[in-house]
């Protein structure tokens, strides 16, 4: 725009770039000032095709529904029926995902255990080892076996009700853990055998196995140590779901966990969270196809996570073929994370309730993602547990409502045929027709 | 009385079940395992003060997660021997493949031959004594414990090291990021003397050099970003 002074010549309006948005420019300035990438918690914040882009069709002339509250709709599921002597028996197909002690406070872990126990589901440890807070409360505790092996010991391994081999996470497939100095309290440091106050960048690959052939032997060792009693899950970030599922099954997994890019993390580079991995929606059908091709769908169970928020998301994931889902972020919100009641404190941190994601800094106003005793004291684990139980019950009721409307007496009887998509992208990713059409984009090719 | 177990005839599950069933009070304290023939996960998850002699070579993860037991392998071991050991002793008469002693939290691993790459990776308190040489990337991200090498070390020794102590008698092909040579003080000579003795090795502590963390990567500093 030339700044011609003549009053008679219309001026062009100032136009903000769609490419260089204020947020993008702010990040450039932040990078220029600090020389380090942005680290944050949470999952991908940008919009990607998701369960909101799917709809259930419901019953009609050609399908009859079940009576709400009267006709039973089963929600229970067993995980680990392939090899384990003692599969995990869940009353509801919504599990609590692994979140590390260190990222979360001890009372927050306790609350997760309390809520899950009351709702009849499992919780999962995380990087940093097993805490008594969680073991004591949770009757079904999945012990994560991670590249860092922080706090890893055979006694805790044998106390676990299942073992989850973590290969990757949706927020950062191919990335390791990160716990910055501010959060390394004496207790966290001791559990991880590291000095207090240093940044912990945990490894991204396991120290003693590399590919699926090694993993098969690693799983054999874990089974030998735990007497073939408990299920072994393999968790992967969503990248190549068809092949990852196939290889996990080949390596001997009882359960495959796939975590999409919206999945939360305690702390990772923003560029990693936003630019690596597949949306959750895009990975379910290929994973299910892999299990079907092996003749093991339902025998090896599939757990899906990454951006699950309500009963509709649960029902949609299951209709696409998942046996259960896992939640991280939503569970934290149920406990009180990002609650507007702490708005004044969020403002002081330069953010706002709902956007707060600097969990790695340990200053969480809600007292959940912190090791600071004063902040931790704001959080009541008994009340938190109750809130989580309520939320899990609501999600289950919602999923049942949908299932009955589709005429299903078991959540796992939901099927892709019950769904349609609102966008072409979602139709292609979920392998269901675009609403009002019989068009399933992308079906001429191979789903892998 | 020596308990003899033929792995080929009786199978891995039976072996580990029998060994894991031993308690602190057991009087079956002496075991020998015949025909290991490269089997994986031999004598894993033990938790009793027993002696186990493995008469031959093993595959992956021999003695994995050991507590209390003394396991002596009259042969060589595959990858991940003594991984995540908590206590006790594992002695390998031959060579060890990759990741020997990985993530070990305690106890002692003695390798009388050579160890391949990534020996002592992510170690968290274990002591490892290698009579021969070790391969590249050994003691990567090693957190705690001591690695003693009587021969030479390969490339990138002690990369991203935390607080583990490294002693090498021979040459070091190269040091990894943030690993530096440090002074040998009298207390290090004493420590080393004890470890060498326990490790059935007659090398002289005075002949070793000590390596440790420069601690420059402990908290992010833009000027060290090139080392990441
Ligand atoms: C605070 C926090 C800590 C986490 N820690 C771990 C961890 O230690 N290990 C792991 O495998 N995943 C970890 N995750 C990822 C979760 O297990 C899970 O994959 C993810 O939260 C699911 O997506 P959602 O948050 O959208 O529900 C963490 C997530 C959060 C939010």
Image: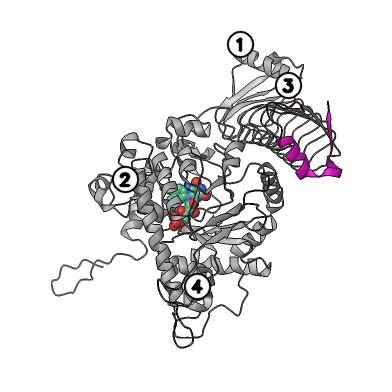
User: Can marks 4 and 3 be said to lie on one chain?
Assistant: no
Q: Position of residue B186 (x, y in %)?
A: 61, 11
The stretch drawn in magenta includes residue A448: no
Q: Mark 1 vs mark 2: give the one in front.
A: 2
Residue B63 at least partly seen: no
> Label 3 lies in what chain?
B
Front residue (pair A380, A67): A67
According to the picture, the residue beneath numbered tag 3 turns out to be B199
Q: Mark 1 vs mark 4: give the one in front.
A: 4
- Please say if A145 is above or below A58: above
The residues tagged by marks 3 and 2 sit, at their Cα atoms, a distance apart of 52 Å
How many numbered marks are there? 4
According to the picture, the residue beneath numbered tag 4 turns out to be A409
Q: B100 left or right of A2?
A: right
Q: A20 left or right of A117?
A: left
**Range of residues picked out in magenta:** B1-27
Front residue (pair B151, B12): B12
Q: Position of residue A184 (x, y in %)?
A: 43, 34
Residue B142 at least partly seen: yes
According to the picture, the residue beneath numbered tag 1 turns out to be B186
The stretch drawn in magenta includes residue B8: yes
């Amino acid at each position: 725009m030339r700044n011609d002074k003549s009053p008679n010549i219309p001026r062009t309006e100032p136009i903000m770039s769609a490419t260089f948005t204020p947020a993008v420019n702010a990040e450039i300035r932040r990078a220029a000032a600090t020389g380090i990438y942005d680290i944050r918690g949470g999952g991908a914040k940008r919009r990607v095709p998701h369960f909101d882009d799917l709809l259930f069709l419901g019953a009609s002339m050609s399908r009859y529904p079940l009576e709400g509250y009267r006709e039973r709709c089963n929600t229970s599921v067993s995980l680990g029926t392939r090899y384990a002597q003692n599969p995990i028996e869940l009353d509801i197909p919504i599990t609590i995902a692994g979140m590390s002690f260190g990222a979360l406070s001890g009372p927050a872990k306790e609350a997760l255990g309390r809520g899950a126990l009351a709702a009849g589901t499992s919780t999962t440890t995380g990087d940093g080892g097993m805490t008594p807070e969680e073991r004591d409360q949770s009757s079904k505790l999945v012990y994560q076996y991670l590249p860092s092996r922080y706090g890893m010991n055979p006694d805790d391994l044998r106390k676990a009700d299942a073992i989850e081999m973590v290969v990757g996470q949706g927020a950062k497939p191919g990335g390791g853990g990160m716990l910055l100095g501010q959060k390394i309290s004496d207790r966290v440091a001791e559990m991880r055998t590291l000095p207090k106050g240093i940044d912990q960048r945990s490894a991204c690959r396991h120290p003693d196995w590399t590919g699926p052939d090694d993993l098969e032997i690693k799983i054999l060792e874990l089974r030998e140590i735990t007497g073939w009693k408990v299920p072994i899950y393999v968790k992967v970030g969503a990248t190549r779901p068809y092949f990852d599922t196939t290889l996990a099954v080949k390596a001997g997994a009882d359960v495959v966990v796939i975590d999409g890019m919206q999945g939360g993390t305690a702390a990772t580079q923003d560029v990693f969270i936003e630019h690596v991995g597949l949306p959750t929606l895009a990975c379910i059908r290929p994973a299910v196809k892999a299990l079907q091709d092996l003749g093991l769908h339902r025998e090896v169970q599939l757990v899906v996570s990454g951006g699950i928020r309500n009963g509709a998301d649960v029902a949609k994931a299951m209709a696409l073929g998942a046996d259960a889902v896992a939640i991280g972020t939503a569970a934290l919100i149920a406990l009180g994370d990002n609650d507007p009641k702490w708005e004044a404190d969020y403002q002081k941190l330069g953010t706002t309730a709902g956007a707060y994601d600097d969990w790695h800094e340990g200053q969480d106003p809600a007292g959940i993602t912190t090791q600071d005793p004063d902040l931790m004291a704001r959080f009541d684990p008994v009340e938190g547990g109750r809130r989580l139980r309520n939320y899990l019950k609501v999600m289950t009721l919602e999923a049942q409502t949908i299932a009955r409307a589709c005429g299903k007496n078991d959540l796992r009887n939901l099927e892709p045929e019950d769904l349609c998509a609102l966008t072409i992208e979602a139709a292609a990713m979920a392998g269901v027709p675009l609403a009002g059409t019989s068009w399933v984009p992308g079906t001429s090719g191979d789903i892998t | 009385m020596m308990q003899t177990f033929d792995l080929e005839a009786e199978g891995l599950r039976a072996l580990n079940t029998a060994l894991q069933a031993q308690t602190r009070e057991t009087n079956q304290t002496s075991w020998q395992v015949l025909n290991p023939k490269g089997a994986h996960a031999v004598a894993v998850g033990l938790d009793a003060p027993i002696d186990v002699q493995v008469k031959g070579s093993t595959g992956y993860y021999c003695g994995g997660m050991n507590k209390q037991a003394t396991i002596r392998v009259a042969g060589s071991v595959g990858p991940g021997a003594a991984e995540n050991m908590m206590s006790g002793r594992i002695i390998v008469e031959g060579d060890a493949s990759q990741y020997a002693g990985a993530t070990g939290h305690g106890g002692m691993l003695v390798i009388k031959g050579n160890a391949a790459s990534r020996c002592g990776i992510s170690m968290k308190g274990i002591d490892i004594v290698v009579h021969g040489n070790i391969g590249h990337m050994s003691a990567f991200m090693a957190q705690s414990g001591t690695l003693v090498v009587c021969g030479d070390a390969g490339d990138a020794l002690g990369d991203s090291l935390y607080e583990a102590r490294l002693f090498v008698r021979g040459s070091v092909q190269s040091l990894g990021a943030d690993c530096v040579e440090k002074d040998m003080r009298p207390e290090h000579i004493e420590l080393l003397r004890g470890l060498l003795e326990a490790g059935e090795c007659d090398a002289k502590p005075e002949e070793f050099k000590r390596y440790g963390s420069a601690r420059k990567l402990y908290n992010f500093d833009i000027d060290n970003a090139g080392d990441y």
